Image (cartoon, rainbow, N blue to C red):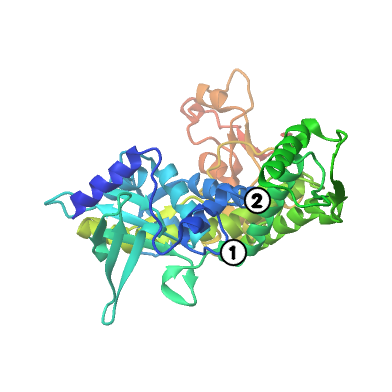
């Protein structure tokens, strides 16, 4: 079964154009883009017929496909930051290259197109004989997939119709479905396109009317009245001569000469129809159905950098992340279990698509530093504080640069030192002929705090490594506290 399906899918992928007969529809309906049709194929065809719908679906599918994914091993703590990344696994290889014809990006983009247009997308899992784990995944057209309801198990399988009409039964472990829940049908998804089909028809008819308007001399239609009935040859001759002389934009405004007839204008005009406003209103309805603003599809009227960044973040939060969450649920709850014990404790997760906000990040860092300072003042250990407030380990490597007012106090509280101890301590040696080499070499050395300085100079004077005592000379070196700008004090 899997081999037959794989061959059908491969054949469909190799075929540039595939014509699939639409069951239960008339020939006229098959040639209509929308009309009275509400099936999945009509919904998918709508993308190439209405520019606003194309822009929305193209933008959402591309944004979803560009997000990177990683495989993680869950932490015992349950915290996201404690997870360990897994870089080698069969499931990760499959997700990065679902099948020989498409990488992950194209796979996700095609799946998201189906989801946005029909409210659902199906992934067909292909295996080889004797191999239980999935080897390939294919995004198939929803109109070719039919669920097989079951009174006891709810769903017993699927039927896939190939491009040549062959019907292939599929088991539950061969299909993964992502769908927007349909309140009237628990087996199928609900498409936003269904709520705007009349508007899409209106937009298409308006475009066709405008096109016909220019083809027909860029003038509204009219009627030629003749006093007596015309024979068939006379009627055909009149029609052919009129079209030859007046049809087309290049023949617009030519003078018409009628031998035995009178021209009567129609009362309707292009301005009366207001097709520009009509198509604009249709675009608004399409954006409403998908919950997308003009900015999201490239309309940047009255926008500045701040509002553009906000719009970008909003799009990621409200449009991209919900789609990613559906994919994440399918990967973790349906695909990974197919890999058996090797996938135990693993989970897929996407990289956050929301762009960083510099102001928010700065405010967050300040708040964390203040929280750390408060916790240290209360007596908590620095290492635990940094982990609790989400700050990394910050080693001390040298003299601090001038800091804003209050920062020294926060740093001192975080490191557990008194403000006075946080100042540098410098060695001052009495340098003359009686100064020993160790004291002379240590002259000018700085210590991070008083505790370190007093370790080498107990009580603040007398270098512990001084050798002057061997010659009867007492050490005259000392350490003094240095001010913020480096001067001794």
Secondary structure under the numbered disc 1 in the rendered image = helix
Q: Residue at x 80, y 40 (%)?
A: 218
In the depicted view, which residue is nearer to us: 341 or 244?
Answer: 244
In the depicted view, which residue is nearer to us: 6 or 175?
Answer: 6
In the picture, the disc for residue 167 is none
Q: Quadrant of the C terminus?
A: top right
Q: Residue 445 at what x, y percent from top left? A: 59, 31
In the depicted view, which residue is nearer to us: 470 or 300?
Answer: 300
Specify whether 207 is left or right of 91: right
Specify whether 122 is left or right of 128: right
Specify whether 79 is left or right of 334: right
Most extreme residue toward the bottom is 152
Q: Residue 148 at what x, y percent from top left? A: 30, 70
The image quadrant that residue 36 belongs to is bottom right
Callout 1: few (<14), some (14-19), or many (20+) C-alpha neighbours within 10 Å? many
Q: Residue 353 at what x, y percent from top left? A: 55, 50
The image quadrant that residue 277 belongs to is bottom right
Callout 2: few (<14), some (14-19), or many (20+) C-alpha neighbours within 10 Å? many
Q: Residue at x 69, y 61 (%)?
A: 285
In this figure, which residue is indicated by the disc labeled 2?
52
Distance from disc 1 to disc 2, alpha carbons, whole Å, reads 54 Å
Most extreme residue toward the top is 433
Q: Looking at the image, do the residues carrying marks 1 and 2 touch, with CB atoms under 8 Å apart?
A: no
Look at the picture and state if 126 lies above or below 102. Answer: below
Q: Residue at x 47, y 55 (%)?
A: 114
In this figure, which residue is indicated by the disc labeled 1?
375
Look at the picture and state if 150 lies above or below 248. Answer: below
Q: Earlier in the sequence, mark 1 or mark 2?
A: 2
Secondary structure under the numbered disc 2 in the rendered image = helix
Q: Residue 58 at what x, y percent from top left? A: 56, 47
How many numbered circles does the render carry? Answer: 2
Q: Residue at x 80, y 32 (%)?
A: 251
């Amino acid at each position: 079964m899997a081999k037959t399906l794989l061959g059908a899918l491969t054949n469909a992928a190799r075929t540039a154009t595939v014509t699939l007969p639409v069951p239960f529809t008339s020939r006229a309906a098959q040639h209509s883009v929308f009309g009275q049709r509400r099936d999945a194929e009509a919904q998918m065809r709508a993308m190439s017929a209405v520019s606003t719908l194309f822009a929305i679906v193209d933008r959402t599918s591309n944004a979803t496909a560009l997000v990177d994914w990683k495989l993680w091993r869950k932490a015992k703590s349950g915290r996201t930051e404690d997870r360990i990344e897994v870089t080698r696994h069969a499931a990760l290889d499959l997700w990065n290259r679902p099948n020989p014809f498409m990488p992950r990006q194209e796979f996700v983009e095609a799946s998201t197109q189906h989801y946005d247009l029909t409210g659902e997308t199906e992934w067909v899992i292909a295996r080889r004989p004797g191999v239980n784990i999935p080897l390939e995944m294919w995004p198939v057209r929803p109109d070719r997939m039919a669920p097989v309801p079951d009174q006891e198990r709810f769903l017993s399988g699927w039927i896939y119709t190939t491009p040549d009409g062959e019907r292939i039964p599929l088991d539950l472990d061969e299909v993964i479905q992502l769908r927007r829940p349909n309140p009237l049908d628990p087996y199928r998804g609900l498409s936003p396109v269904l709520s705007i089909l009349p508007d899409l028809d209106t937009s298409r008819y308006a475009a066709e009317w405008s096109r016909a308007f220019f083809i027909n001399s860029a003038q509204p239609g009219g009627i030629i009245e003749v006093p007596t009935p015309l024979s068939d040859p006379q009627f055909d001759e009149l029609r052919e001569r009129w079209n030859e002389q007046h049809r087309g934009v290049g023949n617009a405004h030519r003078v018409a000469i009628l031998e035995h007839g009178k021209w009567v204008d129609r009362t309707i005009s292009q301005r009366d129809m207001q097709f520009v406003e009509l198509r604009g209103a249709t675009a608004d309805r399409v954006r409403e159905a998908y919950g997308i603003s003009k900015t999201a599809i490239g309309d940047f009227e009255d926008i500045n950098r701040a509002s553009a960044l906000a719009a970008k973040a909003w799009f990621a939060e409200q449009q991209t992340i919900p789609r990613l969450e559906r994919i994440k649920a399918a990967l973790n709850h349906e695909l990974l279990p197919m890999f058996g014990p090797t996938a135990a404790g693993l989970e897929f997760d996407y990289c956050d698509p929301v762009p960083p906000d510099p102001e928010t990040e700065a405010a967050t860092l300040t708040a964390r530093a203040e929280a750390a300072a408060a916790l240290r003042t209360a007596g908590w250990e620095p290492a635990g504080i940094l982990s609790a407030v989400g700050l990394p380990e910050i080693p001390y490597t040298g003299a601090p640069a001038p800091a804003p007012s209050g920062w020294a106090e926060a740093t001192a509280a975080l490191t557990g030192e008194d403000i006075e101890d946080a100042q540098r301590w410098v060695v001052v040696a009495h340098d003359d002929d009686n100064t020993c080499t160790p004291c002379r070499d240590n002259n000018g050395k700085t210590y991070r705090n008083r505790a370190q300085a007093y370790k080498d100079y107990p009580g603040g004077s007398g270098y512990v490594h001084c050798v002057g005592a061997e010659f009867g000379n007492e050490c005259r070196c000392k350490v003094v506290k240095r001010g913020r700008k480096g001067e001794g004090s």
